[in-house]
C-alpha cells in the first residue's frame, strides 16, 4: 500500500513538473497621434511611454514580440523588441486561433503582445476563459495585463499593472 501511494505521488509530481507556464505580457498601444488616418503613429507622449515600457521589462526574458499591423501598436513594442534583439511579428487580432498558435510555438516562454483598447481585454479573456476584462477607455493608455497560462481558458492568472 505504501509503495503504491508513493508511486502515485511520484507520478503526480512528475506530471505537475511537466506542465509549462507560458507568460503573456499584453499591452495596449501608447498615445496615438490624430492625423486623420486609420493608421496614426505615436505622439511624443506615446514614444516616451513606449520607452518606459521597454525599461519596465529590461530584465525580463522575452521570447517573442507581437503587434497588430498598425504603426501605433508596432511602435509601442518596438523599443522592447530592439532591446531584446527580436523582430516584431504581426498577428491578426481578429483571429483567436492566432493565440493558440503562439501558445504552441512559445510554450513555457514569455510573449509580448501589443494591441488595442478592445483587443487586449479580448485576448486576456481568451487566455483566462472568463469574460472579466472589458474594453479600456479610449484615453487610457497605461494598462499592462500579465497573464500566466498553464492551459488556455482554464488555468490562467492575471496581474494588472498600470505604467
Image (spheres, helix red, strand yellow):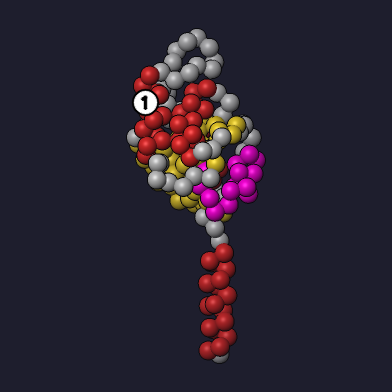
The x, y position of residue 145, in whole percent, is 43, 41
Residue 41, compared with residue 130, is above or below; it is: above
Q: Residue at x 47, y 10 (%)?
A: 35
Q: Give SS at disc 1.
A: helix
Q: Hey, which residue is sitting farthest bottom in the picture?
A: 1
**How many numbered discs sit on the rendered protein?**
1
What kind of secondary structure does the magenta stretch mostly adopt?
helix
- Front-most of 81 and 24? 81
Q: Is residue 84 visible?
A: yes
The x, y position of residue 44, in whole percent, is 38, 19
Q: Residue at x 58, y 75 (%)?
A: 11
Q: Is residue 155 visible?
A: no
Q: Hey, which residue is sitting farthest top in the picture?
A: 36
* Mark 1 crowd level (few <14, some 14–19, many ≥20, 10 Å Cα): some
Q: Residue at x 40, y 24 (%)?
A: 47
Q: Residue at x 36, y 32 (%)?
A: 52
Quarter containing the C terminus: top left
49 in magenta: no
Find disc 1 in the rendering and name its residue: 48
The x, y position of residue 128, in whole percent, is 51, 47
Look at the image and give the residue range highlighted in magenta.
Answer: 97-111
Residue 4, compared with residue 82, is above or below; it is: below
The x, y position of residue 85, in whole percent, is 51, 38
Amino acid at each position: 500500500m505504501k509503495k503504491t501511494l508513493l508511486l502515485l505521488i511520484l507520478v503526480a509530481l512528475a506530471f505537475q513538473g511537466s506542465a509549462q507556464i507560458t507568460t503573456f505580457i499584453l499591452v495596449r498601444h501608447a498615445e496615438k497621434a490624430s492625423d486623420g488616418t486609420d493608421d496614426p503613429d505615436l505622439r511624443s507622449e506615446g514614444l516616451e511611454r513606449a520607452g518606459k515600457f521597454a525599461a519596465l521589462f529590461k530584465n525580463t526574458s522575452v521570447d517573442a514580440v507581437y503587434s497588430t499591423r498598425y504603426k501605433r501598436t508596432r511602435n509601442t513594442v518596438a523599443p522592447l523588441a530592439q532591446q531584446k534583439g527580436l523582430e516584431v511579428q504581426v498577428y491578426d487580432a481578429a483571429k483567436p486561433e492566432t493565440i493558440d498558435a503562439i501558445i504552441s510555438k512559445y510554450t513555457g516562454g514569455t510573449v509580448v503582445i501589443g494591441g488595442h483598447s478592445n483587443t487586449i481585454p479580448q485576448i486576456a479573456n481568451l487566455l483566462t476563459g472568463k469574460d472579466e476584462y472589458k474594453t479600456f477607455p479610449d484615453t487610457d493608455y497605461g494598462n499592462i495585463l500579465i497573464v500566466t497560462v498553464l492551459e488556455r481558458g482554464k488555468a490562467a492568472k492575471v496581474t494588472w499593472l498600470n505604467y
